[in-house]
Amino acid sequence: MSAADQLRRLPKVDRTLEHPTLVELGVRRSVVRRLVAEAIDGERERMLAAIREAREPSPTVADLDAIATRVRARLDDWLTPHPVPVLNATGVVLHTNLGRAPLSAEARMAALAAAGNCDLELDLETGKRGSRLAHLRPLLAALFEAEDVLVVNNGAAALLLACSALGVPGGVALSRGQHVEIGDGFRVAEMAAAGGVPVIPIGSTNRTHLRDYEAALERASALLWVHRSNFEQTGFVVDVELATLGQLARDRNVPLIADLGSGLVDHPEVRASAPGEPSVTSYLEQGATIVGFSGDKLLGGPQAGLLAGSAAAIARCRRHPLARALRCGKLALAALHATAIAHLRPGAQTLPVQAMLEVGGDTLRRRAERLCAQLGWSPACVRESMATVGGGSLPGRELASIALVAPVGSAHDAAALLRRARPAMVARVHADELWIDLRTLVDVDDETVLAALRRL
Ligand SMILES: *Cc1c(COP(=O)(O)O)cnc(C)c1O
């Protein structure tokens, strides 16, 4: 049969819609029709490609049953709410692709409770209109030892808002050594300038001097400091210290905006788990006027962007029109409040991120041996591993960890099997071995881990 004849045998949309697999689905017909049309188009494309590449001069055509089955599978996927839960066995504590910080049980419950009607902007005492930050604001300010705070959608929004509100009219000066690119090709300097306030690059990649900042202030209205949250610089390097910039900002009466990335809280316990990572409070002490950071990095909360700093700077940000466009939703605010409460009780260790960073090697090893025995795997499956913090925190820092190396034939096939199961587990494939790192599974109970691994 010729290629043209084969193409003509493609099922028709109306016929396919009547297929038993696709009737009485309780789904809008217009939606099913669209999926059917897409499936038939896809099949036509596949056949044309096969003809073009002359792999098959006359490719076979999928029949009505096959198309209907494809449509049904696609529809089933649409009808499954995503994202679905994943067990993080990668050893990357803040895994951006896996939703960064897992929330504490209290934060999850708080978000669920706020999902219905809630007192988001109503003062229940007086019955008058209130602010959505009324309860959280003093608590966060105390936690970070700041005069005031503001919460927006994410870290990028915090940066954009601070630069837009405080960098007028002359723009913000940023060292070329701090032109950081974060995930997915986004560049901090471009995000900072997205509100129309120019970012003025100063110095060179490896060396920026105080005189560069001083010269920039002839035009710039603010100084911007971006923490190198995902890389390090060594060699022939000069940087101006943050405290020196803080002094310059005070002398010239301009704001110093600091984009910290990860929002470390300054408790001894928390510090110990992240040595070398600057805290929000330390940035303020060194003279930053305002510090922007994420809620879902080391803070261990939901996606949110926080600004902590002087009352005047926060007030300018709060009044900027972008503040309304970038504001934080009630689910995240509820989860953030529960997370902040956990930070008020350091040592209680109810935050999964904290537990992942702090869990000891012996604890991990004992758990690994127990799991191994229960799975009937050889004790040799328990191996020393290296976990990382990830998520743009503590570049280059590795955390000694313990992993189970699964006794499987093909690590890639086994990884796919774990990914496709529910709950899915995402493990690490390294040197054609399947590594299940236990450090990032501390918030998951043994039964759940065992159930996932028994599928292998
Ligand atoms: C992560 C990060 C951001 C962006 O924060 P999001 O919460 O992901 O929007 C901005 N700046 C720095 C330095 C970061 O590390």
Image (tube, rainbow, N blue to C red):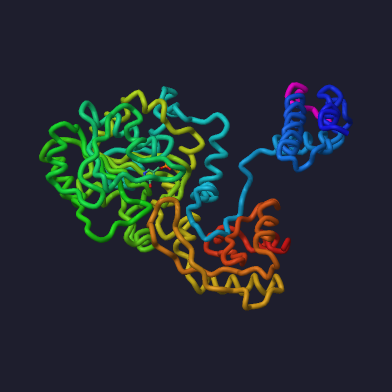
Camera-nearest residue between 325 and 148: 325
Quarter assignment of residue 365: bottom right
Is 2 displayed left or right of 352 in the figure?
right
Is 120 displayed left or right of 209 in the figure?
right
Residue 84 is situated, as x and y percent measured from the top left of the image, at 63, 45
Residue 153 is situated, as x and y percent measured from the top left of the image, at 43, 35
Q: Residue at x 47, y 41 (%)?
A: 303
Magenta stretch contains residue 64: no
Residue 377 lies, with reference to residue 426, above or below; the image says below
Q: Residue at x 43, y 40 (%)?
A: 304
Camera-nearest residue between 430 and 145: 430
Q: Residue furthest bottom?
A: 379
Camera-nearest residue between 132 and 372: 372
Camera-nearest residue between 197 and 137: 197
Residue 306 is situated, as x and y percent measured from the top left of the image, at 37, 40
Q: Quadrant of the N terminus?
A: top right
Magenta stretch contains residue 27: yes
Residue 18 is situated, as x and y percent measured from the top left of the image, at 87, 25
Q: Residue at x 43, y 49 (%)?
A: 297
What secondary structure predominates along the stretch shown in magenta? loop
Location of ligand 1 given as a quarter of the image: top left
The part of the chain drawn in magenta is: 22-31
Quarter assignment of residue 152: top left
